[in-house]
Amino acid sequence: MSRIAKPCRTRALVVRWAWFALGVSLVATSSACGPLVYASSIDKAETALTQARERNAHWYAPYEYHFAQANLEKAYEEASHAEYEDAVRLAKSAQQYAARALRIADRERFEEP
Protein backbone atom coordinates (compact mmCIF):
# COMPACT_ATOMS: atom_id res chain seq x y z
CA MET A 1 0.00 0.00 0.00
CA SER A 2 2.82 2.43 0.77
CA ARG A 3 4.30 1.91 -2.71
CA ILE A 4 1.06 3.05 -4.37
CA ALA A 5 0.54 6.07 -2.11
CA LYS A 6 4.07 7.40 -2.50
CA PRO A 7 3.91 8.13 -6.29
CA CYS A 8 0.57 9.90 -5.80
CA ARG A 9 2.05 12.13 -3.10
CA THR A 10 5.05 12.90 -5.27
CA ARG A 11 2.84 13.79 -8.21
CA ALA A 12 0.66 16.00 -6.02
CA LEU A 13 3.74 17.72 -4.68
CA VAL A 14 5.06 18.32 -8.20
CA VAL A 15 1.68 19.71 -9.28
CA ARG A 16 1.58 22.05 -6.27
CA TRP A 17 5.08 23.32 -7.00
CA ALA A 18 4.20 23.81 -10.66
CA TRP A 19 1.15 25.92 -9.72
CA PHE A 20 3.25 27.89 -7.24
CA ALA A 21 5.93 28.55 -9.87
CA LEU A 22 3.29 29.60 -12.38
CA GLY A 23 1.74 32.00 -9.88
CA VAL A 24 5.09 33.54 -9.00
CA SER A 25 5.99 34.00 -12.66
CA LEU A 26 2.62 35.60 -13.44
CA VAL A 27 2.99 38.05 -10.58
CA ALA A 28 6.53 38.89 -11.60
CA THR A 29 5.69 39.48 -15.25
CA SER A 30 2.44 41.37 -14.64
CA SER A 31 4.15 43.84 -12.34
CA ALA A 32 6.66 44.69 -15.06
CA CYS A 33 4.04 45.54 -17.69
CA GLY A 34 3.06 48.88 -16.15
CA PRO A 35 6.15 50.81 -17.24
CA LEU A 36 6.00 49.35 -20.75
CA VAL A 37 2.38 50.32 -21.35
CA TYR A 38 3.08 53.71 -19.77
CA ALA A 39 6.04 54.35 -22.07
CA SER A 40 3.98 53.55 -25.14
CA SER A 41 1.08 55.75 -24.04
CA ILE A 42 3.36 58.64 -23.11
CA ASP A 43 5.12 58.44 -26.47
CA LYS A 44 1.82 58.63 -28.37
CA ALA A 45 0.61 61.55 -26.25
CA GLU A 46 3.89 63.46 -26.70
CA THR A 47 3.73 62.94 -30.47
CA ALA A 48 0.14 64.18 -30.65
CA LEU A 49 0.94 67.22 -28.50
CA THR A 50 4.00 68.05 -30.60
CA GLN A 51 1.94 67.90 -33.78
CA ALA A 52 -0.69 70.14 -32.20
CA ARG A 53 1.99 72.62 -31.11
CA GLU A 54 3.51 72.71 -34.60
CA ARG A 55 0.13 73.61 -36.09
CA ASN A 56 -0.54 76.39 -33.54
CA ALA A 57 -3.27 74.56 -31.67
CA HIS A 58 -2.47 76.64 -28.59
CA TRP A 59 -3.80 79.61 -30.56
CA TYR A 60 -6.81 78.04 -32.28
CA ALA A 61 -7.88 75.56 -29.58
CA PRO A 62 -6.40 76.78 -26.31
CA TYR A 63 -8.69 74.81 -24.00
CA GLU A 64 -8.03 71.46 -25.66
CA TYR A 65 -4.32 72.10 -26.09
CA HIS A 66 -3.68 73.19 -22.50
CA PHE A 67 -5.88 70.43 -21.12
CA ALA A 68 -3.81 67.89 -23.07
CA GLN A 69 -0.61 69.48 -21.80
CA ALA A 70 -1.85 69.42 -18.18
CA ASN A 71 -2.85 65.76 -18.48
CA LEU A 72 0.56 64.87 -19.89
CA GLU A 73 2.31 66.64 -17.01
CA LYS A 74 0.06 64.87 -14.50
CA ALA A 75 0.84 61.54 -16.21
CA TYR A 76 4.56 62.20 -15.64
CA GLU A 77 3.84 62.95 -11.99
CA GLU A 78 1.76 59.80 -11.46
CA ALA A 79 4.44 57.66 -13.11
CA SER A 80 7.07 59.13 -10.81
CA HIS A 81 5.03 57.67 -7.92
CA ALA A 82 4.77 54.30 -9.75
CA GLU A 83 1.04 54.81 -10.34
CA TYR A 84 1.26 53.50 -13.89
CA GLU A 85 -2.44 52.75 -14.38
CA ASP A 86 -3.36 56.36 -13.61
CA ALA A 87 -0.47 57.60 -15.73
CA VAL A 88 -1.65 55.56 -18.71
CA ARG A 89 -5.20 56.87 -18.30
CA LEU A 90 -3.95 60.46 -18.19
CA ALA A 91 -1.64 59.95 -21.16
CA LYS A 92 -4.51 58.56 -23.23
CA SER A 93 -6.64 61.54 -22.25
CA ALA A 94 -3.80 63.87 -23.24
CA GLN A 95 -3.54 62.13 -26.60
CA GLN A 96 -7.28 62.46 -27.22
CA TYR A 97 -7.36 66.16 -26.34
CA ALA A 98 -4.24 66.86 -28.39
CA ALA A 99 -5.88 65.16 -31.38
CA ARG A 100 -9.03 67.21 -30.80
CA ALA A 101 -6.97 70.41 -30.60
CA LEU A 102 -5.23 69.44 -33.82
CA ARG A 103 -8.55 68.92 -35.63
CA ILE A 104 -9.88 72.26 -34.40
CA ALA A 105 -6.66 74.05 -35.33
CA ASP A 106 -6.68 72.59 -38.83
CA ARG A 107 -10.33 73.51 -39.33
CA GLU A 108 -9.88 77.07 -38.01
CA ARG A 109 -6.70 77.68 -39.99
CA PHE A 110 -8.36 76.88 -43.28
CA GLU A 111 -11.53 78.86 -42.49
CA GLU A 112 -9.76 82.14 -41.79
CA PRO A 113 -9.97 84.76 -44.56
Image: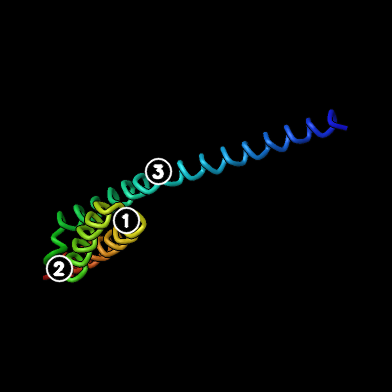
Other-residue count near label 3 (Cα within 10 Å), few / some / many at <14 / 14–19 / ≥20: few
Q: Residue at x 42, y 46 (%)?
A: 31
Instruction: Give the mark, 3 or 2, whose residue is nearer the N terminus.
Output: 3
Q: Residue at x 32, y 56 (%)?
A: 83
Q: Secondary structure at mark 1?
A: loop
- For label 1, the crowd category at 10 Å Cα-Cα, with few meaning under 14, some 14 to 19 and many 20 or more, is some
Which mark is on residue 32?
3
Amino acid bearing label 1: Glu
| Residue 29 image position (x, y, % from top left) | 46, 41
Q: Earlier in the sequence, mark 2 or mark 1?
A: 2
Circle 2 Cα neighbour tier, 10 Å, few/some/many (<14 / 14–19 / ≥20): many
Residue plotted at (68% across, 37% down): 15
Q: Is residue 43 left or right of residue 110?
A: right
Helix, strand or loop status at disc 2: helix
* Pointer 2 residue: 60
| Label disc, if present, on residue 83 of the rendered structure | 1
Q: Are marks 2 and 1 in contact (CB under 8 Å)?
A: no
Q: Secondary structure at mark 3?
A: loop
- Pick whichever, 71 or 53, lies toward us: 71
Location of residue 72 with respect to 61 vertically, above or below: above
Tell which residue pokes out farthest to the top in this image: 3
The residue located at (15%, 68%) in the rendering is: 60
Where residue 78 appears, x then y in whole percent? Answer: 26, 57
Q: Quadrant of residue 86?
A: bottom left
